[in-house]
Amino acid sequence: MGHIHEELDFLKSFIKGIANHFGENCETVLLDVSNPEKYGSGLIVAIENGHITGRKVGDTGTNLGLEILRGTDSEGDKHNYLTQTKDGKMLRSTTMYIRNSKNIPIGCVCINLDITDLVMAENTLRQFTKIDDINTEVKEVFVNNVNDVLDVLIQEAQEHVGKPVAHMTKEEKMKGIQYLDEKGAFLIKKAGDTICTYFGISKYTLYNYLEKSRGGVTK
């Protein structure tokens, strides 16, 4: 292809298809860059959703193409970069060049997606989530009944000790029971029976552990 006008109908359809796919917040532009001395960085020959940047057919391109046309930028295409309009819109943009058989740029397709509202929404959501400074020390579990709460606390006690109950020593069992006591597990009705069964100890042993723990013997 020696000039974009040779495939102008297709190229117009191409940019229209992209704009329709992404919606009214997506501007797509086709530029003729075959005559940089006359048009500078290019002449807009087709545009969809021009309200994004306020441009129209016949307007010139941006400064981005100048380095390409002057041969000082050999990379050419630019993908997924951020830019901003004069009225403050934030755009996520991509620029792709159409070249002739001699690898000389003759046209350019630009995609500019207005992400202003999305960025504002993201900032608003961050105010609610605040994941970066979230307090991970507080553990709250939502359950359907109080017995489920006890089951969760027993699991936490095992994690606190760091091994399954079958491998716990006497001192480690005392440590787990102390954890449950500090978390208020024994305020739950008949919690003692469940805890005794889990740790494989008698009620007498449980009370003995609690007495020592509350007396500051076990840490």
Image (cartoon, rainbow, N blue to C red):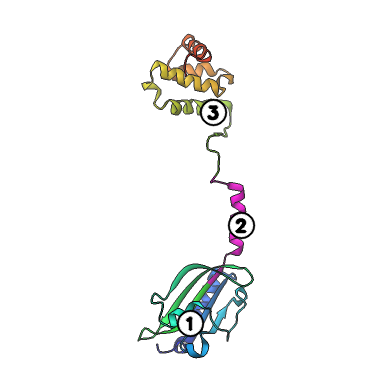
Alpha-carbon span between mark 1 and mark 3: 63 Å
| Secondary structure predominantly adopted by residues drawn in magenta | helix
The residue drawn where x is 47% and y is 83% is 10
Q: Earlier in the sequence, mark 2 or mark 1?
A: 1
Disc 1 + disc 3, Cβ < 8 Å: no
Amino acid type shown at disc 2:
Ala
The residue drawn where x is 48% and y is 90% is 37
The x, y position of residue 14, in whole percent, is 49, 78
Q: Secondary structure beneath disc 3?
A: helix
Furthest residue in direction front, as rendered: 72
Give the foreground label among 1 and 3: 1
Part of the protein shown in magenta: 112-132
Residue 131 in the magenta stretch? The answer is yes
Circle number at residue 121: 2
Question: Residue 2, relative to residue 132: is it above or below?
Answer: below
The residue drawn where x is 51% and y is 16% is 193
Amino acid type shown at disc 1:
Leu
Q: Earlier in the sequence, mark 2 or mark 3?
A: 2
Circle number at residue 207: none
Q: Earlier in the sequence, mark 1 or mark 3?
A: 1
The x, y position of residue 150, in whole percent, is 53, 25
Alpha-carbon span between mark 2 and mark 1: 34 Å
Rate crowding at label 2 as few (under 14), some (14 to 19) or many (20 or more) other CA atoms within 10 Å: few
Circle number at residue 148: 3
Q: Is residue 189 left or right of residue 169?
A: right
Q: Secondary structure beneath disc 1?
A: helix
Q: Report the front residue among 192 and 112.
A: 112
Disc 1: which residue? 11
Q: Secondary structure beneath disc 2?
A: helix
